[in-house]
Amino acid sequence: MKYFCVLICSLILFGSVSAQSSSEKKFNRRYVDVAVTLVATDVKEAHRVTDSLVNVARSDEQKIKSLMLLAKLYENEGDMKNGLIKAMKADTIANATMNYSWQAVISGSLATSFRRLGLLKVSEGYLKKAELANAKQPEANMKLLTKINILHERVFHCFERKQILDARNYVIEASKLIHIDGNEDKKSILIKATNVQLRGICELQLGNFALAESFLKSALNKIQATESNLIPYIFQALAEVEIGKKNYNGAREYLNKVEPYLESGRVEELRMKTDETWSRYYAEVRDREMSLKFKAKSIAIREKRDIIANGISDDLITQFQAGKKFYRSQLTFALGGIILISIGATCCIMFFYRQKKIYKTHYDLQKNGHFDKNLIPNSEEVIMNDSTIIDQLNNSSVIKAKDSNMSKETEEKLYEKFVKQEESLFYLEKNITLSHLASAIGTNQKYASIIIQKFRGKEFYAYIQSRRIAYIIQEIRKSPELLGYKLSYLAEMCGFTTLSAFSTAFKDETGMPPSAFVHFVRKEKGNK
């Protein structure tokens, strides 16, 4: 009977694990179908399936994946605000669960969204966050894929700034990370095709039409039978190539191939690009009326995006910050509980171990006829010893640069590494410590402290505070759109975890609160 019960329990456990595994596989299969194929063929169905994925998602990973897919669908439909809200909700879950893989992916996606809205500075900030998170994620393959996606986003940044040679260099760098083994899944094929397509667009922008055509057709061949929303973008780019070659019939043929994709869903970015190409096509064939008509359509979409960009400010940021605080408080509470339980358990174990040792000594001495009450430790003596240890720790000397016996060569090498860390804006990390910095430059905390004191004239935390305030002042002056954001967002942006800490630090460094500084900058911009 006993063995029969064990067998039944084992079967139930196995069945639940199998069911869970089956459910996970089914979720992932539907997710890939929507992300790669359905989004390009039937947007309404893609939206319906994604909504169901959001509702059935159980794990944090599933919630993040379904929310990010929904965010992409909203973006494609031109609903940028809802797209950003879903992405930021996913980002909140990724941060709360310390999921560095998804932190990197989501930051990269937000970089893309803000770049499409024309907010390049905000986009650049998210790209840097994506790179930092990607460096921490443990899974090598995911790290590689995310790095490729970050490089692709940098290509688009270069397109916006008309830095085409730099864009081509990023594409070439990404291509070195892409390996072909003949057994790729749909997602891998899409990444490779995207890289080739971007190279084709670079050559198109540089006027190398034959080379551009070669790369774009190669991208089509890589996708082959895999239906993807990349295909119409390739057709649109090939139409531009044909216009450059003065082959207007070929251009019209490719543009007509794009039309079915525009009818299947509200893909605003593709519509805007296609309208711009139609406008150029009609200008080339000297149909001024049609050229102006399509130009007006593309401008209307751009103006709509500008209005959306202006509207994404306090409401969206406030909602995002509120969500982050909620999840962060939950995480802090959970970690605090775990720490307290661990400390309590450790103290109990030490107490019982000590009591056991005392009892054993007492018993052994009694047994041998040599019992002495003085062998039992006095509680006052224990307390006095603990206090002495605490006093010694509190009175330990602070490391000073003058105490260093560091060689000149070591000092120069460490300073060079420290400068590189400064350039990567390490001081914006919210939980940065002297230990983290020392590890990053390959030394100990003493030497790291000495480098900061000698070359920056400050203790570590004073230095971090001054650099953060200097950074946010510089960003506010460079990007006037930040003047419309709440102070809590500016605090978050430069590495402070609370608004009060940011305000105190800002006043210490500048002599005025951040609200006054923002007011004066606004007034200065208004006068100009």
Image (spheres, rainbow, N blue to C red):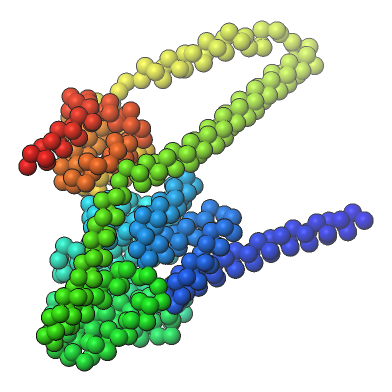
**Whole-percent x, y for residue 153 in the image:** 28, 63
Residue at image location 30% in from the left, 80% down from the top: 234
* Image quadrant assignment for residue 457: top left
Give 312 or 482, whichever is nearer the viewer: 312
Give 371 or 399, whichever is nearer the viewer: 399
> Does residue 338 lie above or below 236 as drawn?
above
- Where is the C terminus found, in terms of image quarters? top left
Residue at image location 11% in from the left, 40% down from the top: 526
Relative horizontal placement of residue 115, taking residue 30 as reference (left or right):
left
Relative horizontal placement of residue 122, taking residue 454 as reference (left or right):
right
* Image quadrant assignment for residue 106: bottom left
Relative horizontal placement of residue 236, taking residue 368 as reference (left or right):
left
Relative horizontal placement of residue 2, taking residue 198 as reference (left or right):
right
**Whole-percent x, y for residue 395 in the image:** 37, 16
**Whole-percent x, y for residue 105 in the image:** 39, 58
- Where is the N terminus found, in terms of image quarters? bottom right
Q: Is residue 6 visible?
A: yes
Give 37 or 381, whichever is nearer the viewer: 37
> Does residue 199 lie above or below 500 as drawn?
below
Q: Is residue 169 visible?
A: no
Identity of the residue furthest to the right in this view: 1
Number of residue marks = 0
